[in-house]
Amino acid sequence: MSYAPAGNIIKSIIREVVKECLAKGQTVSETLATFMVKAVVLDPQNQFNVDRTITKQDVQEVIERCVQRLVDRQSPSVDTIKMQAYFDMHYTSRQEYLKEHRRALQAELIPVTREITDSRAKSRDELETVYGKIVSYVLLRSRMGSATDISTVREAAAALRSIFPQPELGVFIPLSRKDKEQQLEELSMLVTGIRLFNRDRKKGGSTIDDLPAILNESISTSIKHIKFETGASQNLSYQYIALLEGLQAAEIALKDGTVPPEFLKEALYNARQHEAFLGLILADVRVCEEQTQSLQSELQAQMDELKIIVHSKTAVPTAQVFPHFTALAKLWSGLQDEMYLLSILNSMVADLQPFLGAQSWQLPKDQLEIFLEGVEVKTDEQRMKESAGNPAVGILKHRNKYHVFSSKKAACQFASNPDESIELVAEQAKSSPELIQLLELHLQFSSVTPYSEMQLGRKHLTQPVAKCDGDTQTDTHPVESNIVKSYKWNEWELRRQAIKLANLRTKVTSSMQTNLSHMRRDNVTQTYRPKEAACQTKKDGESSVPRPQVYLAGLRGGQSPTTRLIKTNLTRPVDE
């Protein structure tokens, strides 16, 4: 079976599976359909041989079995596979979440950014319009308040005018697009920092949410909820294990045989997978909690330092306060990122809950309690204590892999035939494909990859022969070049050169010298004009004399019959 036809067949099978599931009212992603196709082919009960040529009957049978499993709403196994597909398609690292979030925010800012950077406003009305768009840009980028709220717009505009008055648009408009975008980003961060500082001083920011308090409460609530959901899944797992152990030991018998042991195993896998995914989400929430506490401490320290700088001053140098405003904006943006991550994780917790529906519908809680009457339900902690001597059993290395065991009996059984034991695990995983993801057995199934790594046309049911396009190129001159520049390939050129050499044989070069030209040569003399020079023999100076200050008193007379004039001279002496 060649690679290209196999790829086309797989694609057509996946498309048909999605189409038929949709016709039956079940929406299935191509990723889930791809994995289900692989699971059906790997299942030994279906007896598919991938080494032989695939017929139309085989294709139709694969499609029917896949659709039959995907539309089964009463199968915990299918629910587990759907849960695994959903989680791997939506769960990623913090960095990837934030990168995608920032990309979405930048996309929202593109229209208003282009309107600002492409503007060539000249008139007063046009400049006012551009300034209003800058205010809108600042609000959209800061995510602090709505751009339609009048009080928020006025507050942002006032903060912007304090650092970027409207007359400065005359300098802003001629800048290049890159410089405009950089300045817009800087203005947005400064305005954000100013608004946060004013909010802390109770001089504005009434529309800004108390993000630290909201985050603290949300994180606490999320941790409690996830722990509750995890505890519920763990309790289900403990109960299913107790029932299975009781059935194996023939200590209990299910009434009417309504719930087969296979269903209990599938339900156990489902609960354990849900517990594992909740554990990953809880760990991320814990990281959010630590990051939030760190950001809040830095934010408060930065705010206190800014208060010391500003204090009660009416004017502060921009070089001192602007870096602090920018730092406040960055820290606040970090808190906003943590809020976004927390909302994503909470939504994933809610989306995982429906994948427990099959077991809860087919085995309700009251019926499960009836089956467990008289059965001891042990927790994982109790089982760990009972098997505390397991490390003494040792570790067995087989084919560069290390194996541990639950008991000495299991270790001896594995050591007697390791390959057979490993093969039994693989066979069990083929029958229950959800175990491949749950137990991370991808290395044993090279043809089955995690959902997040699946790409149509690149991964197939069988591992095809690796092929790639290649080409080679040799040097133009493998040997070191030895080019003779005097070589002529044109015979007429050679003929002309031969005639020229032949004519030179009859030519003589002669010279003579007369008495007048004997011992003479051309002489050149260069002279320089006299240099202009000047000197100064006297020094200009100046002086000022004191201003006369003479005061007269008694000019208007007084009560005395005679006028008495008093003259006072307060002029400073010249030599003083």
Image (tube, grey):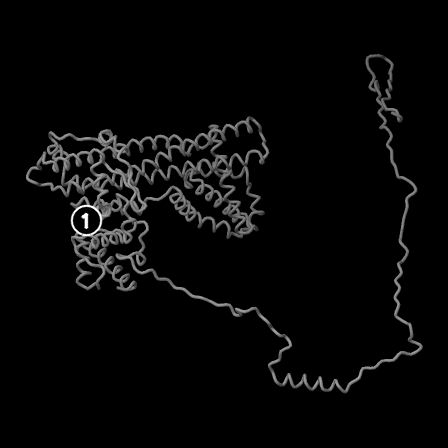
Residue 461 position, x and y percent, is 26, 56
Q: Around disc 1, counting alpha carbons within 10 Å, would you say few (fewer than 14), some (14 to 19), or many (20 or more)? A: some
Q: Measured along the vertical axis of the image, is residue 216 above or below residue 438?
A: above
Closest to the observer, 383 or 403:
403
Considering the numbered disc 1 on the image, is that residue within a helix, a strand or a loop? helix
Closest to the observer, 403 or 449:
403
Which residue is located at x 27 percent, y 51 percent?
445
Q: Quadrant of residue 575?
A: top right
Which residue is located at x 18 percent, y 50 percent?
71
Which residue is farthest top? 560
Residue 92 position, x and y percent, is 35, 44
How many callouts does the rendering have?
A: 1
Is the C terminus in the top left, top right, bottom left or bottom right quadrant? top right
Check disc 1 and give the amino acid type.
Ser
Which residue is located at x 22 percent, y 56 percent?
17
Which residue is farthest left? 256
Which residue is located at x 30 percent, y 64 percent?
4
Residue 272 position, x and y percent, is 23, 39
Residue 158 position, x and y percent, is 51, 37
Give the left or right position of residue 74, taking residue 572 as reference.
Answer: left
Give the left or right position of residue 454, taking residue 573 as reference.
Answer: left
Q: Quadrant of residue 274?
A: top left
Q: Quadrant of residue 80?
A: top left
List the residue tagged with mark 1: 431
